[in-house]
Amino acid sequence: MKRDETTVGIVILIFGGVTTLLSLRMPIGTFRAAGTGLFPLLLGIILMILSGFFLLNLLLRKEKELEKKEAPVEAAPRSLKPVILFLGMMALAALFFNSLGYPLVAFLLMVALLKILGLKRWPVNIILSLATAAASYFLFVQWLKIPLPKGWLGI
Amino acid sequence: MFESLQGLMNGFGIATTAQNLFYCLMGAIVGTLVGVLPGLGPIAGIALLIPATYGLNATSAIIMLAGIYYGAMYGGSTTSILLNVPGETASVITCIDGYQMAQKGRAGPALAMCAIGSFVAGTIGIFGLVFLAPPLAEAALAFGPPEYFSLMAFGFIVLSNVTGTSLIKSLMMAVVGLIIGTIGLDPVAGDARFAFDYAPLLGGIEFVAVAIGLFGIGEVLANVERPPEVLGQRVLVPRLRELFPTLQDLKRSIGAILRGTGIGFGVGLVPGPAPVIATYASYMTEKKVSKHPEEFGKGAIEGVAGPESANNSACQSAFIPLFVLGIPFAPPTAILLGALMIHGVTPGPMMIGQHPELFWGVIASMYIGNFVLLLLNLPFVPFFANILRIPKNILLPLVILFCITGMYTVNNSVFDIWMMLLFGALGFMMRKWAYEGAPLLLALVLGPKLEAAFRQSLMISHGNFGIFVNRPVSLVFLLGALIFLSAPLLKPVWRRAQGIRRKGG
Amino acid sequence: MFKKIFFILLTLAVGAVPLYGAEFPTKEVQIIIPWAAGGATDLIFRALAATTGKYLGKAVVVVNRPGGAGAVGYTEGMQAKPDGYILTAAVTPLTIVPHQVKTAFTYNNFAPILNVVDDPSMFLVRSDAPWKSLKEFLDYARKNPDMITVGNSGAGGGVHLVALAFERAAGVKFNHIPFAGGGPSITAILGGHVNAVSVSPPEGISQVQAGKLKIIALFANKRLEMFPDVPTVKEQGVDFAMGMWRGLVTPQGTPPEVIKKLHDAFKKGMEDPVLIKNAKDMAVNLSYVGPEDFGKLMAHDHDFYGKLVSEIKK
């Protein structure tokens, strides 16, 4: 747990550092006539100071203290795989959003997500996805007249 | 004051004609729908429906548009509570405790409390509007760039102190939010920053994408981590009795509601994204005055009642600068301004004198709108609460679809969807390592304004930092920020001092 | 057999094109406003959108894309499909901003439809300000360079440049404070946080009507209809007049028939009595200019502001 916290702290420190470096490339100006880079520069420096502080704090605390604050007993095992699959499916949906058009993407996405979460019976899956895609199409595109991309199928 | 009362009576007469009641109801319903869909907020709703109001007379048109504005505020809290997806920007805070309450099977009381709190806030707010409008508007004008800056700095420090358990982690998140807020165009000079010549980044990262990503998608992913058997379970089926707030809930909330109303009303007068700030301010206050602060973040009803009331009354007082000064302080009121002008009404100091029936008609109808929304929302509470009975493995994909659709409708931009996903992943990871999303979000919203205020102040003062402390209002806020910043550090010292004294005497 | 299918498809494809063109518009038309809602450009185009809808046959909707003195909105407008459904409100800054920052667009990326408004700019001060006339104002400015704070609706934006150009014409120096739009700058002056603001109608008009603000400098060639007692700076010895035009454009490459349809509809919208009344109430000066002349106007101003910006930068 402590190692994770340290890693995150370091990531934030690097983020602050990158911000600072990139800001230096922009005109800084003076306080009277601030340049574009002044504010991000200040922020980058502040972030580095804060994360430095944070990391220092972590190092100084005793191991025992941290162990006590550990996460409570796990209720059920957790697995990262569905999360990654979920994100992957959503990314694909974003990728094909414009080319395939909204209703089709909505349908396919629902099918995929339901399957990942364990809905094994295909007929139920397809019907549910179809119903959802159709319902949202009618609600948003036809009734509320909100522009959603028309793809391939022309709808 | 007597004229005001008379004007109000006339207003009620106008607002209760069958025609105007109908428009009010229409607006409220459309607004609620629009508010429930994440992303599509009152701005989009009002803008979408302005063409539909062309055929109406000015008063009816404004009544309908105001109804949409309110309805959207009410609707936004529904998805915040049920799905942890902020329906629109001001509902983000409601997600924190509202969602937790829903998880414990108390979605009904949460939803009901929102409606009740908003209604009470609306009622009190109307009186404030009627009697205090002109002096308040003048007070709002006293806020110049230095006051603005100090107010926001104060807000940041206090906020970071209140959510989550680690001050430094929240501060870091706030600064990260500020940095993300700098992406895009410099608010003062207009040069591109961190945009790497990539056009979609020029406009900066869309706040809604971050909000829905961090809270909505992040929460979904956190749920997805669990195995299918857990997901297939249904949430405890609440009995009818449990759908409504208990007497204890009401008792605890009444203070929060009243405080929230006051805070929201005051904050709503200040230019900028007032409803959002008002909700954060109310949450901070409630946590500080509560007898059980440890409950916050786990389902404290005050954490829902207070912010929602603040939200509603901030929306009310946002109308004051619009009607009294003719200046819109936030995008929704700006659109209303446009609508008013199209209908031949020029808001400004003369409006109340020139078009009293419009002004009072709208005020009265805002009150009626509040009432209508209460009636609309309360019966729907069981219906909404039951949405949670859908097994998670079906509900979660629906939520995802919902989020993606809503996100797209804001800017018609697939890039926004990618941002939402990115922040969804980030939100998921932040949950694992106990970092709070609320400070980041507020920072993102306020960042550009903070910077603009900072730079404007220094330009006015020719680089002299004294401008921040020479002005009384600004000084007060800065001192407050200092106190809140040093409090966590001083507390252990204070306690030690107390301990020594006890032992000694 | 395949040849038959091919020919059918070809006919359909060919048939679909004129079908699409002849039916313009098949859905609503959007106008991108590169500034926040409630500002001068926003208000006049919302009013115009309201009246044009019926002449066009489909609704005209306004969309705000604020940021970077117009850069965000213009970039988006330039990249839109040239099918006539996404128009952009072209205002003088379109010809100014490309000289100040590196933008992806210039006026050349757009095809002109028509110009709608030509408004003078002006300086407003509070009615309780110590300067009762332009002369007093300029005298004070000369004695105290860089002290009078003048708010504007955005650094590098139209009215900011007007203020800078006026400085040169009058031989004074102001302290320019940028705000995020006309609304915030008016708020600032009402609160007394700046000494003056540089604006263009209808910004500030209702406050002047109510007596809270007054026009201390009018940069026009002739007096305003709504305030006939206010002299122009030309009348008072400073040879300077600068205003802001506001028109509509569409991305380069839009078919000419579509442009003609849009032009005709908007022109009728401009001549609609409701719009004329709205403009009058806002003290906005309607000034129709057709597409070719509008194009020439933009080209002329592009060169003019190019020279002005480089001179000011020196």
Image (cartoon, coloured by chain):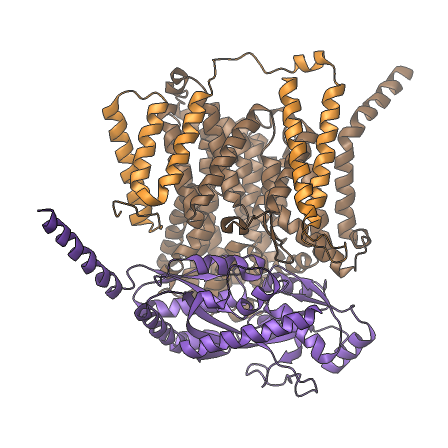
Observer-nearest residue: B238 or C200? C200
Q: Chain C's colour?
A: purple
Residue C247 versus residue B143 in the image, above or below? below
Give chain A's shade: orange
Which colour denotes chain B? brown
Work out whether C238 lies above or below B296: below
Q: Is residue B67 visible?
A: yes
**Foreground: C264 or B83?**
C264
Relative placement, left or right, of C284 versus A130 is right
Q: Residue at horizontal 30%, vertical 48%? A: A150
Q: Foreground: A10 or C52?
A: A10
Please state the horizontal and vertical placement of residue C175, each as a whole percent of the image.
Answer: 74, 66
Total marks shown come to: 0
**Is C10 situated above or below B222?**
below
Position of residue B441 measured from the top left corner of the image (x, y, whole percent): 58, 40
Work out which residue is located at the far right of the displayed protein and give it.
Answer: B504
Question: Where is residue C119 shown, x and y percent of the image?
Answer: 54, 76
| Residue at point 66%, 75% (across, down) | C165
